[in-house]
Amino acid sequence: MAALALTEDRHVGAAYTLTGPEAASQLKQVRLIGTAIDRDLRWEEQPRAEARESLLAAWGDPAFVDMALDGWAAMIDAPEPVTTTVEQVTGVPAREFRQWALDHAADFR
């Protein structure tokens, strides 16, 4: 996707929302990564105030930090909607998160 967007004129000025072919909550993503690396992983929410403090130290912009935290909180129960953009642009369907996790298992070990 990135290679095409950077090398083909038809993408100039375009903005794409990229997803896999299925909605995967953050909890499901953690479970699929655990399966890929053959480990039991758990999801634990970090308190918002603690996360905000860390992100402010890293990013500095309170409005951006709050927007990011609000977005991530919303995705716990409502993952981002699925798009077909990858297939429309590349002609190849996006990989399922399960396959992506398997392909990147070494990165999580």
Image (cartoon, grey):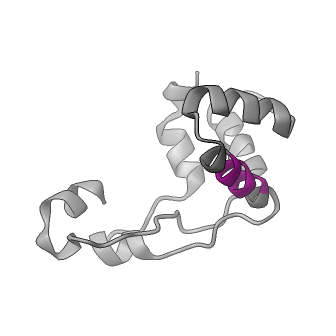
Q: Is residue 54 above or below residue 94?
A: above
- Dividing the image into 4 quarters, which one contains the C terminus? top right
Residue 43 seen in render: no
Residue occupying the point 87% across, 35% down: 47
Residue 101 seen in render: yes
Task: Name which quarter of the figure residue 105 lies in.
Answer: top right
Would you say residue 72 sits in the magenta stretch?
A: yes
Residue 34 rendering spot, x and y as whole percentages? 70, 35
Name the side, left or right, on which 7 lies relative to 1.
left
Front-lying residue, 14 or 19: 14
Residue occupying the point 54% across, 40% down: 102
Residue 13 rendering spot, x and y as whole percentages? 25, 71
Residue occupying the point 39% across, 69% down: 86
Q: Is residue 40 above or below residue 70?
A: above
Q: Is residue 35 above or below residue 86?
A: above
Residue 49 rendering spot, x and y as whole percentages? 84, 35
Front-lying residue, 40 or 78: 78
Residue 36 rendering spot, x and y as whole percentages? 62, 37
- Dividing the image into 4 quarters, which one contains the N terminus? bottom left
Q: Main secondary structure of the magenta part?
A: helix
Question: Over which residues does the magenta segment extend?
Answer: 66-73
Name the side, left or right, on which 32 lies relative to 83.
right
